[in-house]
Image (cartoon, coloured by chain):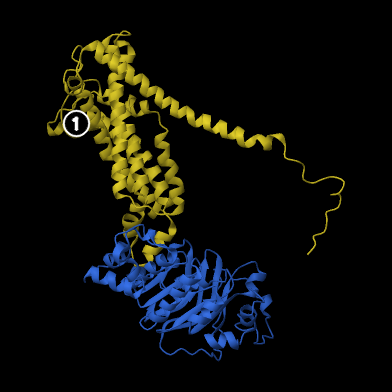
Chain colours: A blue, B yellow
Amino acid sequence: MTTRSPLRIEPTTPPDESPPMRPSDPLPALPPPKPDPATVPDPVISARSLCVWYGSSMALKNVDIDIPRHKITALIGPSGCGKSTLLRCFNRMNDLIPGARMEGTIKFEGIELADPSIDAVALRRRVGMVFQKPNPFPKSIYQNVAWGARINGYKGDMDELVEKSLRRAALWEEVRGKLHKSGLDLSGGQQQRLCIARTLAVEPEIILMDEPCSALDPIATAKVEDLMDELKEDYTIVIVTHNMQQARRTSDMTACLMLDEAAVQGGHRTGVIAEFSPTEKLFTNPSDPRTEAYITGRIG
Amino acid sequence: MNLPVPSGSVERPRWPAPSRFRRYQGPVMLSLLAICALVTVLTTIGIVAVLGLETIHFFRESHVSLPAFVFGTEVDPPKFGIFPLIWGTVMVAAGASLIALPIGLLSALYLSEYAPRRVRAVLKPALELLAGIPTIVYGFLALVLVTPLLKACFEPLGLKVDSYNALSACVVVGVMIIPMVSSLSEDVLSAVPRSLREAAYGLGATKFEVSTRIVLPAGLSGVAASFILAISRAVGETMAVVLAAGRMPNVTANPLRSVETMTAYIVAITGGDASYGTPKYLSLFAVGMTLFVMTLGLNILSGLILRRFREVYN
């Protein structure tokens, strides 16, 4: 039995008595549909009852989330609650971790991402990713941007694509004279924008950002945030952040993840979505007490 | 907030003054470590000095000119033309590298990028075990296994295979140096940060593209270093080569013939062929010097190539 909201009264099974999940257990029944304030029309990604396992430990339990198109969705929550794990489901990056697997359904434009047989390589071209630490390739600035396009068989004018991507990432003016210098010679903030440019060059539909500003200073952070605001006209952005102000400043929708109390009792760290609402509502009038406790700094 | 004072701390101080050992640790360790480092430097200087002096001595005693020494084709005194020895050495080293470098590099890529963790845990030590086999064992394997196999393969085609031949030396030396390439290369490829791989996968790269176009270039300097070490080892390899390739100084492109390498020549001379102080005896220093110059040249060359191609990540 799964309790989606502690406000719901469960007379038979109190949440702290439900046993920890095992991979062999059958999936728990879908929770009854709750009146969700966050109705998302035409979501680009839609997950239902998504569970993620690392070996025998459950990292995410029964996640329901709809990622709105051409909006910024923020994932917030305390450390270890599965924000990055959820993000990495969207482009099957968890495949790189031995023993990781998904259950439930997660649909991206009609593709079932939980199906192990889908082409993750083709998916990742359409769902790009920017990482926590800027990780440009040890190649020239030009090669950094061109690399992804080249391996994906881009047929157009490469110089044009590189310039367009760097302009879009608000980096062109700073690097135009030194395209053949190493990407590692740039400052941290420039490197992160180079990584964004590299992602834009393969023309994805979604950009996943895993704490993209946590290694940057406030000025570089502001630049990346401005950039996100511009990019959402053409792209759907999902951002994991530890910085609640950042989530509030930048995002349209916010999902607050929490550790599942029942799992914690059993010695496991399993994340659940405590609340998924429009950002303004989540921060001003949270409907879940755990969210409220987290955003006011009482937990986390 | 005031921390409670631990009981008893007034009578018996909990933090005694640093012992004499801890106080003098720094300078003692510094000199100890410096001495150890100095040993290798002094050894190198010593070797170069001895080789250099005796080489000069050799040229003075034998009245052989440097070009005649390097390019002459008659090894025996008084000519001392060691070109056949250089030829044999290069041939064996090149053949061994042709076998070891691709196999070693591909197995390193397999181990670091493709192999499941459990396979790797078994395979890597197994490969390294190859490096622990005494080289003379490889030598008689060449004699009793590789050469008969080569004979069985080539003689039906009408090609004569000498009992001692260069190809069998290439094969055993090649196998011998595979673990050097694979083990060292695997270490550097595994050390390429995960974040670079994730970045590439995130752009829609396949495993092959990530391995060959991101990981390999990033680890190139280490891979090249392993190549150089392996080639130097092949150049300097002695016992296996003496047993496999024999002692016939030949300048031939046919790997089925016997050749003599510089190391085999040195073994023969130190084995009592020449009496002390004669030009023949001194020639071993000149040959040793030539070997040293060859491997030094390889190292310098690789440094130049690396500076041009490697990708530095931090």
Q: Nearer the viewer, residue A189 or A117?
A: A189
Quarter of the figure with the N terminus of chain A: bottom right
Residue A243 is drawn in which quadrant? bottom right
Residue A67: x percent and y percent? 45, 82
Q: Is residue B80 left or right of residue A42?
A: left
Q: Chain of mark 1?
A: B
Residue B305: x percent and y percent? 28, 44
Q: Nearer the viewer, residue A160 or B167?
A: A160
| Residue at 83% across, 54% down | B6
Residue occupied by mark 1: B255
| Residue at 31% across, 18% down | B285
Residue B219 drawn above or below residue A250: above
User: Badge 1: few (under 14), some or many (20 or more) residues near its Cα, within 10 Å?
Assistant: many
Q: Amino acid at mark 1?
A: Pro
Residue B153: x percent and y percent? 20, 34
Q: Secondary structure at mark 1?
A: loop
Q: Residue furthest left?
A: B158
Residue A121: x percent and y percent? 34, 68
Residue B138 drawn above or below residue A1: above
Q: Nearer the viewer, residue A180 or B179?
A: A180
Residue B61 is drawn in which quadrant? top left
Quarter of the figure with the C terminus of chain A: bottom right
Q: Is residue A256 visible?
A: yes
Q: Is residue B113 left or right of residue A19?
A: left
Q: Is residue B172 visible?
A: no
